Image: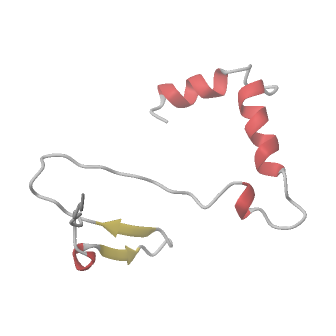
Amino acid sequence: MTVMLQAAFKKEDIKVFQLDNGLKIILYEDHKMPNISYYTFFKVGSRCERPGLTGVSHFIEHMMFNGTNQFGPGEFDRLMEFSGG
């Protein structure tokens, strides 16, 4: 069986620009649907760590769900969820 897939959009319909603060915006408008989708991607985590700081992201991750002096175990997750994160 041969299945032909058609792209949902054309590459030329995608607009890319950068704000003065360095934030890169990728925009695709589709006026056939009355909704909006928004995604934020951050260049963070272990793959973005520089030599000498490897493991810091993993350490902070564990602090977030195991708790710290200011946040008990799971409290940070609840706060983020309450805030929409």
**Quarter in which the N terminus is drawn:** bottom left
Q: Is residue 13 left or right of residue 64?
A: left
Q: How does the figure colour the protein chain or chains? A: secondary structure
Against 76, is 37 above or below?
below
Q: Residue at x 78, y 45 (%)?
A: 58
Residue 73 figure quarter: top right
Residue 54 on image: x %, y %: 85, 57
Residue 9 on image: x %, y %: 22, 67
Q: Residue at x 65, y 57 (%)?
A: 44
Q: Residue furthest right?
A: 52
Residue 8 on image: x %, y %: 22, 62
Residue 45 figure quarter: bottom right
Q: Residue furthest left?
A: 32
Q: Residue at x 90, y 63 (%)?
A: 52
Residue 47 on image: x %, y %: 72, 61
Against 14, is 79 above or below?
above
Q: Is residue 36 left or right of residue 74?
A: left
Against 59, is 49 above or below?
below
Q: Residue at x 64, y 28 (%)?
A: 76
Number of marks in picture: 0
Residue 2 figure quarter: bottom left
Q: Residue furthest bottom?
A: 12
